[in-house]
Amino acid sequence: MFCKLSLRKWLVVCLPACLFAFGPGAFCAAPDDEQLGGVYVFEIRDEIGPAMWRTTMQSLRKAKAMEAELVIIHMNTYGGLLDAADSIRTCILSCPVPVWVFVDNNAISAGALIAIAADRIYMREGASIGAATVVSGTGEVVPDKYQSFMRSMMRATAESHGKDTLVQGRDTVFRWRRDPRIAEAMVDPTVSVQGLIDSTKVLTMTVEEAIRHGYCEGKASSISDILAAAGMSDRRVTRHVLSPVEKIIHFLINPVLQSILIMLIIGGIYFELQTPGIGFALGVSVVAALLYFAPLFIEGIADHWELALFFVGLLLIGIEIFALPGFGVAGVSGIILMLFGISLAMVDNIVFQWDWAYGLLSVFKAFCVVVLSAVVALGLSIWAGRLFFHSSVLSGLMLQAEQKRSEGYVSFDDWSALVGGAGIARSMLRPSGKVEVDGRLYDAICETGYIQAGQRVRILRFETGQLYVEQDD
């Protein structure tokens, strides 16, 4: 039995092998540098999400292991998911190695939160930092409950850097190194900072403004400039490089691709139900499910029980199709479990640690995305089925024969000729059981009361594939 960690390692090894065959060692990470010390650099240039959170954890862990003197984040981002940004922020604040940020053009929204968590901030000429109002996926400002959380998080991050002690004449003054009110103004347009912004706009600072108000230690055009200004030009620089496996995982977690994979899962199952045997359609669905769940599980977004929901749902649908008549409770339950399994796998469980309401809202949004993708997949599958399977070329792939009642096909044997005859009860009828007529056993139902085994019975009628009998005195 695999533990959670070993299963993820197994998927990291097997997923690329299932995707491509680049040869031995093609998906191995770059060999570790055995030298200790120096400066470790990694980039935050894409949308902030689970993949970037994973990169940050790996980089800070590696920097600590190699006893690096300094970690520098090369940043250029317009933001991303708040839960991932909060995790990155917490990781930076608790890192024993000093962390600096080089803002190479933009540290916007969630990027501003991460930058403020760093011990030092350097910015390229023309760069910006701020605009951290929480918005939805459509760009709309979310309710104040979430803005309040973001405001407090921005303030707390700024306050974590403490205060400077200033002596002015005979007075001792304590001043925040990074003014929490400025951090709050990046979220809330009602917060004003004298000499910087009024109370009608969300704050975004230029390089000069950031330097003047303590949110930037200086200008720089490269990592080399930062190290030169800090007197560390002679330090060895180690850069974090994504392995091919990580690049594939980052690609597969893309929301657009995930929607396509969901459609392939649903569409593949639908097509398989329309064709005889087990073939290509089911293979497509299985591969799509692997590509959907494996990266989410490796990233730590999806958990064991979420995968179990999907596969139990798939099993129930299989039982309903192959073992039970009609389509009832098992089939409907299977569909619901599959949809919830796919939906819950999209949501990182960490969101429930800070706001259950936001977590439930995230699950609801994910469920809507999955249902919409499923509806689109079914619609396209039906259209494609009519277009291709009813063509002269591909008609052999689909079941075309119909068993019509007018041609003598029925769902049960016709035993109406037995009505009026007699037989013997071979089991107790209470009210159903077995009766023997002319040496053959039939299922029967007692019209009234019950009949002991061995009693003679008379056949009253034949309805809905069932014989109705009474005791023959």
Image (tube, grey):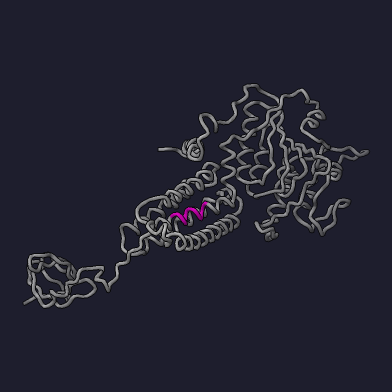
Q: State the residue in front, 352 or 461.
A: 461
Q: State the residue in front, 382 or 446.
A: 382
Magenta: main secondary structure: helix
Q: Left or right: 79 with respect to 199?
A: left
Q: Which residue is drawn at 20% across and 71% down?
A: 466
Query: Could you say which quadrant of the image residue 125 lies in?
Result: top right
Query: Could you say which quadrant of the image residue 369 lies in?
Result: bottom right
Q: Does the magenta stretch include residue 1?
A: no
| Residue at the front extreme of this rendering | 392
Q: Please state, as top left, top right, bottom left or bottom right, where the N terminus lies in the image.
A: top left
Above or below, 399 against 417 in this view is above
- Provide the residue span drawn in magenta: 261-268
Above or below, 2 against 388 in this view is above
Query: Could you say which quadrant of the image residue 251 lies in?
Result: top right
Q: Position of residue 234 (x, y in %)?
A: 77, 22
Q: Does the magenta stretch include residue 262?
A: yes
Q: Where is residue 394 in the image (x, y as percent from the top left)?
A: 41, 57
Q: Is residue 144 visible?
A: no
Q: State the residue in front, 314 or 16.
A: 16
